[in-house]
């Protein structure tokens, strides 16, 4: 029997770089995708950039990757930077399978 890790997200708006950091944790699956999408939308309002910190994400499904791609497209069309930070090995594996680093750039370091 497997257990799901509860989804959680917070958005912090930076004052210096005027970027928003979305810190996400738990499982991004079918049931949490709408909340994830909402957090990404909030982060992209009025900011010059969006960074999505995925370090605490235990699982991301295809819908979560698609939500990241939609957020990255919105940022790109608005002329704003978008990046992922600290994807866990599980998340990176899904990104490798379902996306490209050109669509979803990863901050290293």
Image (spheres, rainbow, N blue to C red):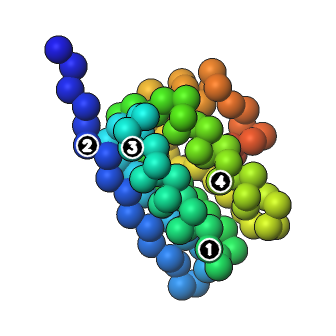
Label 3, secondary structure: give it.
loop
User: What residue would you read off at disc 1?
Assistant: 45
Circle 3 Cα neighbour tier, 10 Å, few/some/many (<14 / 14–19 / ≥20): some
- Residue situated furthest bottom in the rendering: 15
Task: Report if residue 108 is visible in the image.
Answer: no
- Earlier along the polypeptide chain: callout 3 or callout 1? 3
Q: Residue 62 lies in what quarter of the image?
A: top right
Residue 14 locus on image (x, y percent) = 52, 78
Distance CA(mark 2)–CA(mark 1): 26 Å
Mark in the foreground, 4 or 3: 3
Q: Quadrant of residue 20?
A: bottom right
- 94 or 71, nearer to the observer: 71
Which residue was labeled with disc 3? Answer: 32
Q: Position of residue 2 (x, y in %)?
A: 21, 19
In this figure, which residue is indicated by the disc labeled 2? 6
Report crowding for label 2: few under 14, some 14 to 19, many 20 or more residues within 10 A (C-alpha).
few
Q: Nearer the viewer, residue 107 or 79?
A: 79
Furthest-top residue in view? Answer: 1
> Residue 53 vs residue 17: left or right?
left
Q: Earlier in the sequence, mark 1 or mark 4?
A: 1
Separation of marks 4 and 3 at Cα, in angstroms: 16 Å
Are the residues flagged by discs 2 and 3 in contact, CB closer than 8 Å?
Answer: no
Element type where label 4 sits in the image: helix
Q: Are marks 3 and 1 in contact (CB under 8 Å)?
A: no
């Amino acid at each position: 029997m497997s257990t799901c890790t509860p989804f959680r997200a917070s958005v912090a708006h930076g004052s210096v770089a005027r970027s928003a950091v979305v810190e996400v944790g738990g499982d991004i699956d079918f049931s949490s995708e709408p909340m994830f999408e909402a957090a990404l939308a909030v982060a992209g309002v009025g900011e010059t950039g969006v960074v999505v910190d995925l370090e605490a994400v235990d699982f991301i499904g295809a819908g979560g990757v698609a939500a990241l791609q939609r957020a990255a497209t919105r940022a790109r069309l608005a002329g704003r930077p978008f990046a992922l930070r600290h994807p866990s090995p599980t998340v990176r594996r899904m990104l490798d399978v379902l996306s490209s680093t050109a669509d979803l750039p990863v901050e290293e370091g």
